[in-house]
Amino acid sequence: MTETQGTQAAPSRRALIGWGGAGLALGAAAAGGAVAMARTGDDMDPAAAETGGAVEFHGAHQAGIATPVQDRLHFAAFDVKTEDRDAFVQMLKDWTDAARRMTAGKAVGEGAYGGLAEAPPDDTGEALGLKPSRLTLTIGFGPSLFDRFGLRDRRPEALVDLPQFPGDNLDRARTGGDLCVQACSDDPQVAVHAIRNLARIGFGKVAIRWSQLGFGKTSSTTPDAQTPRNLMGFKDGTRNIAGTETDRLKKFVWVGEDDGPDWMAGGSYLVARRIRMNIETWDRTSLQEQEDVFGRDKREGAPVGKAKEHDEPFLKAMKPDAHVRLAHPDSNNGITILRRGYSFTDGTDGLGRLDAGLFFLAYQRDVRKGFIPLQRRLSAHDALNEYIQHVGSAVFAVPPGVRDSGDWWGRTLFSKEA
Ligand code: HEM
């Protein structure tokens, strides 16, 4: 089978590198370097977005945070299985090489065929012929990683264990993880291929603890794009930090030089929550109640008393326990997070109910000043709580971006020099 088989209209993944790479290089030159162009989201050539082009892997920040949100998600949390620090560091380097190739639309290593007949191929092969599809791979380090490899004194103060919130019903099998990789792409097969190949490279050093597939992005980091709807049928992501809002990203998302520790400068903190929706109960709820729960109308997404989705909300017009009223920065001393969640449906639960909901992903500069106080308020008062339950949870320190072709994921953490 050839790479282009079955993709007559589309150039192959390998063929795309030619123009994709050239386009990115030109973009980098125009913007004054790969770092400047890469991570704010405004680097994305709209044409590349439409054609499933490649997102630059290198930059000051990791891709997949401020990058315009792709349609699909495969998120994996891993447990470390080795005590050998050198072996783990080598795996991070191997992962980086593979991530660099896969995000550019290339196969891992020597590819899926053509190598030694006696050995398994380097790449599993299911992404051959597919476009890069804006694949981004974002790595994070969980609190438990810092109990290993002599990293205890390198754990960021901001990487706290999340407290138990009222109503939490966490499944241990879907909670925690020593590290994570968030794969986002417009093609689910490209995202799944990426996680699968990283897991394969990590065999013996790490093992997947839990994973989550997501679809129908429930947030937008592209201001002019149409706001997607969540599984409750409401527009979700109306008020969010856009990938183009450099100042707000700096203020609320990226860890600053003075925040400490040094190795996290340019990074961020990720909270992941698997939030199950009681879909069947919601579907029997009146439209008025549904709109009251959010404080926005279902058709337009406009705040109560306003006509348009992007009109400034008048919080006092909403019910005191409305989700938007409680989550709005004005009700929380300005707290602002970048939401990047996806819907999920994982079959049924054995009782005839859909196991569906929102896989909530939020990036912030400090969880203690972001998700935690926000969720304390929501978990105690939100009208939405009647219809949802948090069933999985994890928090990760997301290191800064990989600078160039000689750099690797986690270098600032594992090397002496930052
Ligand atoms: C299944 C659970 C959830 C659903 C269905 C949901 C849905 C929504 C919807 C429909 C909006 C209004 C549109 C928008 O501005 O994006 C919204 C806003 C928001 N939500 Fe949620 N949400 C959920 C959980 C959470 C959680 C756990 C947090 C944070 C701890 C959160 C934080 C926010 C924030 C900050 C806003 C924007 C408020 C504003 O600035 O007006 N949401 N959510």
Image (cartoon, rainbow, N blue to C red):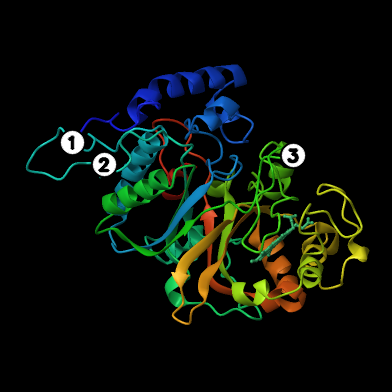
Q: Is 51 on the left-hand or right-hand side of 84? A: right
Given residues 358 and 398, the one toward you in this image is 358
Residue that sits furthest to the left in the current view = 118
Q: What amino acid does circle 3 point to? A: Asp
Disc 2 from disc 1: Cα separation: 8 Å
- Mark 3, ligand 1, within 8 Å: the answer is no
What residue is shown at x 51% (from left), y 72% (from top)? 354
Image point 61% across, 75% down: which residue?
280
Q: Which residue is mark 1?
A: 113
SS under mark 3: helix
| Mark 2 CB within 8 Å of ligand 1 | no
Task: Give the percent coordinates (x, y) of residue 51.
Answer: 50, 29
Report if residue 221 is visible in the image: yes
Q: Residue 158: x, y in percent?
A: 61, 61
The amino acid type found where label 1 is placed reads: Tyr
Neighbourhood count class around disc 1 (C-alpha, 10 Å): few under 14, some 14–19, many 20 upward: some
Residue on which the image places disc 3: 247
